[in-house]
Image (cartoon, rainbow, N blue to C red):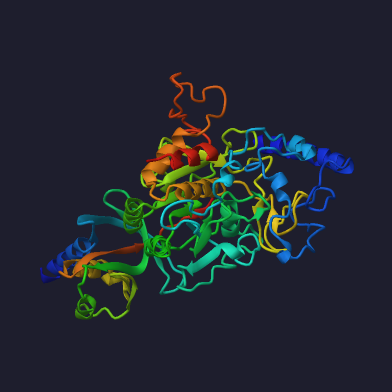
Amino acid sequence: MKKNIIIKKNIILFFISIFLTACGGGGGGGGGGSIQSSSSTSSDNSIPASSGVSTNYFQYAWHTNPNITNIGYKALYGIDNNAHINITTTWSKTKGKYTTGAEINQSVKVAIIDEDFEVTHPDINSKIISTYNVMDNTTNVSNTNKLSTSLSHGTAVAGAIASSANNTNSLGIAPDVELILINIDLGGEFTGDISTATDGDFEAAFKKADELGAKVINCSWGGGELKTRTLAEITRLRNKGITIIFSSGNNGANHDSDSITDPSELDDVIGVGASGINNDVASYSNYGSKIDILAPGGDATLSLPLLDKLGTIGRNVSLSLVNNNYTFGSVGTSFSAPIVSGVAALMYAVKPTITPDQLRTILITTSNKIGTGAAYSDVAGDGTTSTFDSIRAYGKINASKAVTKAESLP
Amino acid sequence: MKFILLILVTFSTLFASDFYYELNKKIEIKKQLNKKIENSENTIYEYETISGKIIKFKNEIIVECKQNAYCEDDFIDLTINNYKKIFGEVYLIKIEYHSNFFIKLQELYKKKDIKSATPNYITSMSRR
C-alpha cells in the first residue's frame, strides 16, 4: 500500500517536472531535459571529470543550502525551508582547517571505513591523503563493490563529508578536511550480498585510521554486532580523543526491540538517524534510546545530491539535474552519518582539544527539535533542548550552533 | 567394557574441548549449527554458545601477545606454522584441521606470553 502511494506520487512528480522543465523552471546545472530513468544517461555526460567540482549543484543541496532559489526544484519536491543544517555561516570560520592550536591552517583528518571509493572523482581526489584496503593489505580502494551498477557507496559518503566547494558553497560539509579512505568488505542491507570481513579486519581498519591521524571516523554501516577486539579498539580510540560516527540503519526499526547491539547503539560512538526534505525524521530511519541525533539523509521523494562513479557506470539517477558523476539515486542513514562527521570535523577545527564526550554533548544540546505531534512532548519549557524523542533522538543537527558552542569551550 | 570406556572417554573429550577464553571469561560451546563450505580454506563454521550467542568463523585465530613478549616460539611449540603478524603484537593464525580448533585455542591461551587467543569471528556488516 505504502509502496503504491510512493509510486503514484513519483508519477505525479514526473509529470509536474516535465511541465516545469518545459516552462524553464526545472533543469538547471545538469543540462535540462526531462526526467530520465535510472538506466539512461544524462545529456551532459560529456562534461569531463576534470572540468570542475560540483559545478553549480549547490543549488540542489537542500541539506547545506539555506536559500534554494530554484523555485521550480523547491516546489517540485516540496523542500521545507528548514530542511538544511545551518552550515553556511560556519564556513566563514572554517571549512575543515584548524583555526587554532599547534596545527593551525592544517586540515582535520577524517577517516571513512567503507567500501568502494572512486578516488579519481574530482570532488574528492585532492583531499585524499591515504588509502588502505584491509581485505588485501594494499592501497587499492577503488572498484571493490561486488555490484558494479550500484552506488559507489564509499564515494558518496566521502562526498557528503568533503565534496569540494564551488566558490564559497559546497555539497560537502567540510570541504577543507583531508580524507583517509579505508576499504572493508561490506554486505548490502537489501541487496543480498554478504560480507565476510572479520573481527580482525574491523579492528585493523580502526587501528589504521588512528595510525594515519584521523580525528573523526565515519562508519556508514552496521546491522550486526561488532566483536570483542573491535569493541575494545573503539573504546581505546574514544579515550584517545577520536570521535566515531555510526549510521543507525534503514529498516524503520526500533533498535531497543531487537536482540543485538547495533554499532550505532554503542556508548563509545555517536549514532545518527536520517531526516528528509520535510524537515522531519525519515520513515526508514532506525531509532532507539541509544541513537543520538538526526541529519539529512533524504526520503522517498528526494535524496541528497551525492557523488557517483565517473561516467556511465554507477547509480546514474540524475533527475535531469546533475551529470553522471553525481546522483540522486540513493537515500539512507549512510548519508546522514557523514553530515555529522563533517560537522564534527569542523568542531575539532575550532577546538582541537575537544573530547568525544564534549562533542556529543554539544551536538545533542544544540540540535533543532523537529517534527510534530508527540515529538518532544516532554519539553520542560525552560528553554533547554536536551530532551529526547523516541524516534527523533535529541533532534536534527544544527551545524552553526554546534561549531560556535565548541569554539567557546574553555 | 574397554570399548564402552573408550567411547565414554572419547565423548567426554569431545564435549570438554569445545570452549575457549575471551577477556578471561570461559566461553562454552553448546552446539555446532552448520558450516558453509566455499572451499577448504574459506569454510565458515557456525556455533551456538551456552549463553545463546551465535558465532561464525573460519579456521582462524587471533592471538595477542603480551607486550614485549616473543610468542612465535609458542606457535612452534604447538606445531602452528601458518601465522602472520597483522599489527602490533597481534597475529592471525590459520588452523589446518577444524577438529583441532578449540584445542589450539586452549593451548594458546595457556601460554604465559599470550594475552588472548580468540576465534577470528566473521562480523557481517552492511552498507546503510
Location of residue A265 by image quarter: top left
Q: Where does the image place residue A365, in percent across and percent down from the top left? A: 44, 33
Q: Where does the image place residue A70, in percent across and percent down from the top left? A: 77, 40
Q: In this view, does B113 lie to the left or right of A178?
A: left
| Image quadrant in which the N terminus of chain A is located | top right
Q: Is residue A39 left or right of residue A360?
A: right
Question: Vertical placement of A371 versus A277: above or below?
Answer: above
Q: Where does the image place residue A232, in percent across and percent down from the top left? A: 31, 55
Q: Where does the image place residue A290, in percent across and percent down from the top left? A: 41, 38
**Quick one: B27 or A334, which is closer to the camera?**
A334
Location of residue A261 by image quarter: top left
| Image quadrant in which the C terminus of chain A is located | top left
Is residue A8 visible to us here?
A: no
**Quick one: A167 or A78, which is closer to the camera?**
A167
Q: Is residue A112 left or right of residue A126?
A: left
Most distant residue in the left direction: B1
Question: Vertical placement of A339 versus A393: above or below?
Answer: below
Location of residue A256 by image quarter: top left
Q: In this view, does A382 lie to the left or right of B112?
A: right
**Quick one: A9 or A127, which is closer to the camera?**
A127
Is residue A28 visible to us here?
A: yes
